[in-house]
Amino acid sequence: MDDDVDSLAMELDSLDPEDVLIAGRLDGTEVDELARFHQLDDYVVERVGPSGVAEVTDTGAGCASVSWQIRLTDG
């Protein structure tokens, strides 16, 4: 568990002021984690991309979690 906390702390420390981090859980779902990751990733990218005010700049996934780094733009 400490590795997960350290990894998240490092990711948060790397954010620029115009970045936002969204995190989600993949465990405990009725579908397998990889399928759930693809569902969530598609949802986030489809909402953020066309918004004109932000873009997904990075995605990270582990066994039980996923995160998206989103950069806010002047849009």
Image: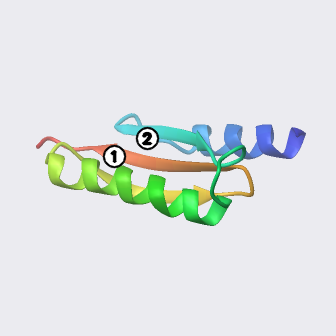
* Amino acid under disc 2: Asp
User: Badge 1, how many Cα within 10 Å: few under 14, some, many 20+?
Assistant: many
Q: Is residue 72 left or right of residue 15?
A: left
The picture quadrant where one finds residue 36 is: bottom right
Where, by quadrant of the figure, is residue 11 drawn?
top right
The residue lying at 49 percent from left, 39 percent from top is 22
The residue at the far right in this view is 2
Badge 1 amino acid: Arg
Q: Which residue is mark 1?
A: 71
Q: Is residue 15 above or below residue 44?
A: above
Assess disc 2: are there few (<14), some (14-19) or many (≥20) residues with their C-alpha within 10 Å of its C-alpha: few
In percent of width and height, residue 66 lies at 60, 51
Query: Along the horizontal axis of the image, is 28 left or right of 15?
Result: right
- Read off the residue under disc 2: 16
User: Residue 35: where, in percent of width, then height?
Assistant: 57, 64
Which quadrant of the rendered structure holds the N terminus? top right
Which is more toward the observer, 63 or 55? 63
Q: Earlier in the sequence, mark 2 or mark 1?
A: 2
Q: Is residue 23 left or right of residue 57?
A: right
At a point 67% along the width and 61% down the height, the residue shown is 32
Above-or-below relation of 1 to 31: above
Above or below, comparing residue 19 to residue 40 in the picture: above
Q: Which circle, 2 or 1, is nearer the viewer? A: 1
Secondary structure category for the residue under label 1: strand
Labels 2 & 1 near each other (Cβ < 8 A): yes
